[in-house]
Amino acid sequence: MSEKLVRVYKKFYIDEIKAHLLIYGDLGGSCAACQKMDIKIDTTHCPECKTEFKFIAFRNPRSHMPKIQKLHAERPQVAIIDYEDYNHHVGEQKAREFLK
């Protein structure tokens, strides 16, 4: 048998994720806390605000599957989260704050 990656749903506070999230796109990553751009995937802390990356969200996970598997093998303590879920909840949170 071979191990496969599967999605698991777990409750988190969005602010906790945002404070420690690396958002990875096609060419590089950005820190969700301070918006620093061009961060490499193997970086453990933001070079700008020094936050530790405990979560990584891939904008297009299907195209980054080899990177995701390598990352999971090298840094199993980092949680890989769904970018669309994260983005949806951040937008929802902003809307609630705006309507207060």
Image (cartoon, rainbow, N blue to C red):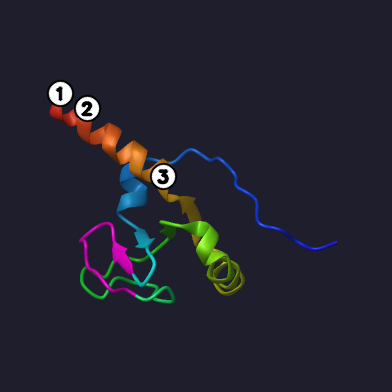
The disc at residue 84 is 3
- Residue type at mark 1: give it: Leu
Q: Main secondary structure of the magenta part?
A: loop
Mark pair 1, 3: CA separation: 23 Å
Q: Position of residue 12 (x, y in %)?
A: 43, 41
- Residue 15: quarter of image: top left
Residue pointed to by mark 1? 99
Q: Position of residue 71 (x, y in %)?
A: 54, 70
Which residue lies at the image location 75% right of the left edge and 61% below the top edge?
Answer: 3
Q: Position of residue 80 (x, y in %)?
A: 50, 56
- Residue type at mark 2: give it: Arg
Label whose residue precedes the other's in the sequence (2 or 3): 3
In magenta segment, residue 90: no
Q: Is residue 33 left or right of residue 98?
A: right
Mark pair 2, 1: CA separation: 5 Å
Q: SS of the residue at dot 1?
A: loop
The 10 Å Cα crowd at callout 3, few under 14, some 14 to 19, many 20 or more, is few
Q: SS of the residue at dot 2?
A: helix
Which residue lies at the image location 42% right of the left edge and 73% below the top edge?
Answer: 41
Mark pair 2, 3: CA separation: 18 Å
Q: Is residue 49 left or right of residue 84?
A: left
Quadrant where the N terminus is found in the figure: bottom right
Camera-nearest label, 1 or 3: 3
Above or below residue 9? Residue 80 is below
Range of residues picked out in magenta: 29-39
- Residue 5: quarter of image: bottom right
Above or below residue 79? Residue 64 is below
- Residue type at mark 3: give it: Glu
Residue pointed to by mark 2? 96
